[in-house]
Image (spheres, helix red, strand yellow):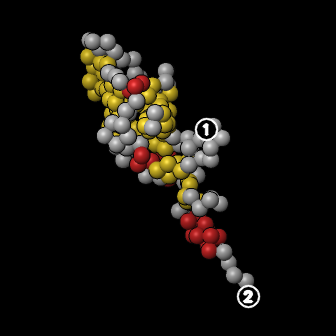
Amino acid sequence: MTTQNPFHRLRRSLAGVGITVCAAGLLTTGVGAGIAEANPGAVVQQGIEAGKVPVAVPASRYVGKWTKNSAGLTLRKNGRGNIVVFNGAANSETRNLSWRTTKTGIRITYGKRTRLVGQGAGLRTGQVVTARLARSQGVTYLQMAGRYTTDWCERDRYGAIRTCN
C-alpha cells in the first residue's frame, strides 16, 4: 500500500479552482486563473532585495489611505480607489483607479477624472504605474514608479518617513 503525500492531494484539489500550492506551501495563482490578478486579497510574492529571501505579502497590506506631499492615494480592498494630486497652488486633479497584485507588488491603472482644478496634474486615463512596499528608517512605505518615483506613507498603520512629507 502506498501512502500519498497530503501536500500532493491538496495541490490537486486546489488546481480545479486555479490555485497552486508551491513547494513552500504558499498559495499562488496563475494568470490563467485570474484570481491574484483580480483579487487584492490574494498573497503576492515580493522581489528579492539585497540577497534576502522573498517574503509573501498579503494584498491587505496595501489597503489604506496613503499620503505624500500634495497628494493622497486610497486603495480599497475591492481593487478600487482614487488618487488626488496637486501640481502647484492652483492645479489639481482627482481620478478613480483600479489596482491589482503582481508578483512584485501592485499595478495601479488610473481611471476617469472626477475633479479638475486649473491645468490638473498630468494624469491620464489608462495610465499604469507600479508600486511595492519598501522599508526605510524602520517604516514601511509604498514606493511608486511611473513618470517618476515617489514614496507614499500610510501614517496611521506604518508611520512616516521624510520623503512622504
Observer-side mark, 1 or 2, equals 1
Dot 1: few (<14), some (14–19), or many (≥20) neighbours within 10 Å? few
Res 122 → quadrant: top left
In front: 155, or 147? 155
**SS for dot 2:** loop
Residue 143 relative to residue 95: left or right: right
Disc 1 to disc 2, C-alpha distance: 46 Å
Q: Quadrant of the C terminus?
A: top left
In front: 107, or 62? 62
Q: Residue at x 26, y 11 (%)?
A: 90
Amino acid tagged 1:
Glu
Q: Residue at x 58, y 52 (%)?
A: 30
Q: Residue at x 46, y 42 (%)?
A: 100
Amino acid tagged 2:
Met
Q: Residue at x 62, y 59 (%)?
A: 24
Q: Position of residue 161 (x, y in %)?
A: 40, 30
Res 52 → quadrant: top right
Q: Return the mark for residue 1.
A: 2
Residue bearing mark 1: 49
Q: State whether residue 144 is above or below residue 157.
A: above
Residue 80 seen in the current view: no
Q: Quadrant of the N terminus?
A: bottom right
Dot 1 or dot 2, earlier in sequence:
2
Residue 108 relative to residue 77: left or right: right
Q: Position of residue 103 (x, y in %)?
A: 56, 44
